[in-house]
Amino acid sequence: MKHHIIIGAGPGGVVAAETLRKTNPTDQITLIGDEAAPPYSRMAIPYLLVEDIEESGTFLRATDHYKNHGIDYIQGRVANIDPNTKTCVLEDGSNLSYDELCIATGSTPISPPIEGIDLPDVHSCWTLEDARQISALATPNSNVVLMGAGFIGCIILESLVKRKVNLSVIEMGSRMVPRMLDENAGGLLKQWCIEDGVGVYTSTKVNAIKLADPDINNGSSMQVILDNGASINADLVISATGVKPNIQFLQNSGLEIDQGVLVNNKMQTNIPNIYAVGDVAQGMDFSTGEYTVQAIQPTATDHGRIAGLNMAGKNAEHNGSLNMNILDTLGLISTSYGLWMGQEGGDTAEIYTPEVFKYMNLRFGIDDESDVLVGATTIGLTQHVGVLRGLIESKIHLGEWKQRLINNPMRIMDAYVASTQELDNVVH
């Protein structure tokens, strides 16, 4: 009987453990989490902030789920691993031996090098403890500054608005969610937020966060100094300026590490009995074939499933993760798929009606794939957006429908139906 250890109790680690157990009912499985709470979803924290759920509502599974499925869940932090002796060393000095290991340690918020970033009322929004601190400070009419308008920042943004704070968002990029949306889409999202009462400052940096005298600062305890010389009063500052993979404990392990832990299409590292999944894994990108870190939950769960199957002795291969983001910001839905920024030389189809916050941009491939949809961005459109993902993942040649979409991108469902029917006729 083998002993499988999974370091990290986020979605990727939990799915790896469950897949392994389902596929192999007898082997020993140990899941290690480094937080006091049971395994939970960070993506549920905004719902906790607006009190739609209690803390238990963030838990990935019921607390007795792991015991009932023969998964030993322990709380602790792994200090290092020794592949030669197949041992995990925990920070408390204890050792655990493994036959196979899966690293699912996720990522950690990046702390920007800003004066005052370590002040008591400056927080990330990443853990349940962060959520508790934010809930205590983000009270109605309090002044809150959110640093970063990326994907995570925009999810937090909505929960803060619902808490009725006075919110200012500072984004150093030229638009909101710059790693997901192009200029048109990011600009529409900014305008939408402004019309909902949120102060949004793009192409702007925070130079410093300083303590202030509440008696002469309208009751606020801090001032956020911007690079344009302006300052904003703040009772709470939230930093959402990006994350980095938790790979520091692996530096002397012999694992190949670049941006994250390099893995093959089986989620194996360069050491065959060690796997890596989720935010910590540098796996294949579906659209480019390059190896990148994709810090999104769908990628983590997909990685976990593939790793779990292979750890159980199956032969499962990963086809690459599709860059896929769906974001609801104050009721405005934005999406991006695949190579949403396009390829040099590829054609584009676009519809842009900013007065009603509607936008669709389709990106086509090049050379032999010039009639293949490779990327897409939408704002304010919810119908048929799943079709975009289907067309990109299937790499269907659109033929004459490419030009029809250039003439009218809203015919995307017609293009999908016609192209898939044609493909079915060819197959049969």
Image (tube, grey):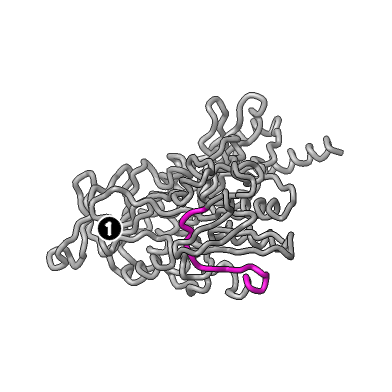
Which of the pair 249/48 is nearer the observer? Answer: 249
Q: Is residue 206 above or below residue 258?
A: below
Residue that badge 1 annotates: 118
- Taking the magenta stretch, the answer to whether it contains residue 345 is no
**Can residue 214 be seen by looking at this rendering?**
yes
Which residue is found at the position 70% from the left and 36% from the top? 396
Identity of the amino acid at label 1? Asp
| Residue lying at the far front of the rendered structure | 85
> Within 10 Å of the Cα at label 1, are there few (<14), some (14-19), or many (20+) other Cα atoms?
few
Quadrant of the image for the C terminus? top right
Name the image quarter holding residue 101: bottom right
How many numbered dots are placed on residues in this image?
1
| Residue lying at the far right of the rendered structure | 428
In x, y percent, where is residue 57?
A: 53, 72
Which residue is found at the position 72% from the left and 63% from the top? 22
Residue stretch rendered in magenta on the structure: 66-81
Which of the pair 130/44 is nearer the observer? Answer: 130
- Taking the magenta stretch, the answer to whether it contains residue 73 is yes
**Residue 124 appears left or right of 225:** right
